[in-house]
Image (cartoon, helix red, strand yellow):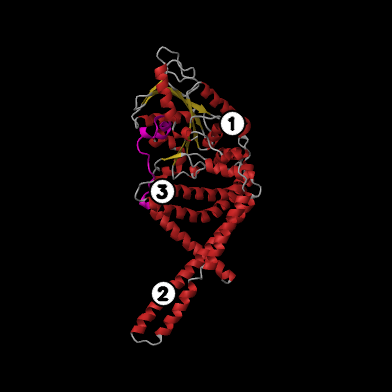
Amino acid sequence: MNDKRDSVNDYVSTTSRKQCHSLAGRPVNPRGPGRTGMPSIAYIAIHGVGRQEDGKTAEAMSASFIDGTSRVGATFVDDPQPQRGSVRSGQLTTAAKTTQHVRFIDAWWDQDVSPPRLPLVLRWMLRVTPFMVLTTIAAWATDLLVAGQTSTRWDRRLFTLISGASILVAFVLTPLVVIVLVVVNILAVLRPHAYPVLNNIVLSVFGDAWLYRSEELDSGVIPRLTALVEEAKSTSDAVILVGHSQGAEIGRRLALATPVDACVWVGGALTPLATLRTLRNSPALPWVLWVYVLLVPLITSTVIAHVLRTTGDALGTIWEGFTSILETTLGDTSAAQRGSEASDRMFALAFADLPAMLIFLLFIVIAAVVLRWAARWPADLLHQPLCPVFEVKSLADPVCFGAQNDQSIVRYVPIRSGMAVFREHVAYFQKPDTGIALLEPLIGVDGRPAPYEPEFRWSTYALSIASMIGLIIIANLAGSAILRAIGW
């Protein structure tokens, strides 16, 4: 298994050398392209959610792949006509002077599904979105932690600032999202055809996610794409699946049933779709999560307010003790008594936070135990393809946050600046780093330049600090009101 994960490059290079020696005076490998006598590599592109056009994902993937060749010292020469059902094909010559024949095949599945009814999707969104917000934020915090640990940049330790701010934002964002969805549901009932753009977004994006969560893709999409992968395997020396967004999760399931030589997930929606399927598979889990979503902001606000109040009292007491010592040295006989009283208060304050912290820790432990008891993961989520898996991610793309496969090779891409960041999820194939990652299964780690390491502007760190301060103030105000209400 470990040998299989090392790199497709090992397989392709070895196969290439063997075939080159065996081609002299011998027939070509029957799985190869026949005319060229070189290893045949099939890249299969699987698109994500939303209305898609046949062939467009493979076209974007091939353009990104070819853009990456110039950056790794390779060249690509197109065939006069694409071969064997591909949208594009040609000969790749690497910097190591090895050659492969590469085909780009589109696994278009959009025509096999029909969006569900709008009210059904909206009600489902109202049930699951609060949990998705928390899951996304938790996954982002995990990605930031991992990126900070693996990066060599000097500012990698500051990634935790962004992580801390994102966790606090989740407490504010979750109820706001619920309010927005309630309003959208009401509008959809009162004026079902008044907002066609909103309807199209809900059905084309969240409708496809609903279809996957409902596993209705099993009857039509998965069998047809499985047949496509099997056909590519019968005519190629190596097959590489490339899944964008939801296509990554579909590709993962395809690779479990039909082993391939490598997988590249581009902005893969593995974690959110796993969460949605788990929610559907766990009848008790939504109820437990709703209690958790409602209680976490209240308990967190109360703990923050209590800690800040105790900290303020402690600082005031320290100052009082310091001034009393100073006044005693100046001859004020009453100051000694005040100093003694300040010392007693300091001793009492040392344990003042203990009850609140114990309650908070107890809540976290109980929540973790109950959530683990309630969760029923679909069986296939516990398994990953037995081949090299490359994950292409952006730390500004919430769809790809988190990781299910700790064996995958993560390649980050630079974050676009300005308003373009809001289209980060659909811009992967426009970035050179994505093309290099697509080539990596063929050229190996040694054949590529150093991977990009995530970085953030100082404005991002400043915004994170400001967000943390602002949200702590809000939490303190809310928690103080709760403490006053319960007389604590």
Tag 1 secondary structure:
helix
Q: Is residue 186 left or right of residue 261?
A: right
Residue for badge 3: 149
Tag 3 secondary structure:
helix
What is the crowding at mark 2: few (fewer than 14 residues within 10 Å), some, or many (at least 20)? some
| Residue 122 image offset from top left, x and y in percent | 61, 45
| Residue 214 image offset from top left, x and y in percent | 63, 39
Residue 207 higher or lower than 363, as above or below:
above
> Which disc is residue 222 wearing?
1
| Residue 176 image offset from top left, x and y in percent | 54, 53
Split into 4 quadrants, where in the image is the C terminus? Answer: bottom right
Residue 13 higher or lower than 318, as above or below:
above
User: Which mark sits nearer the N-terminus, 2 or 3?
Assistant: 3
User: Which mark sits nearer the N-terminus, 1 or 3?
Assistant: 3
Mark 1 or mark 3: which is in front?
Answer: 3
Q: Amino acid at mark 1?
A: Ile
Residue for badge 2: 318
Depth check: 345 or 134 in front?
345
Furthest-top residue in view? 25
Residue 456 seen in the figure: yes
Residue 81 lies within the magenta run: no
Q: Amino acid at mark 3?
A: Gln
Residue 92 higher or lower than 126, as above or below:
above
User: Which mark sits nearer the N-terminus, 2 or 1?
Assistant: 1
Span shown in magenta: 436-460
Give the quarter of the image for residue 7.
top left
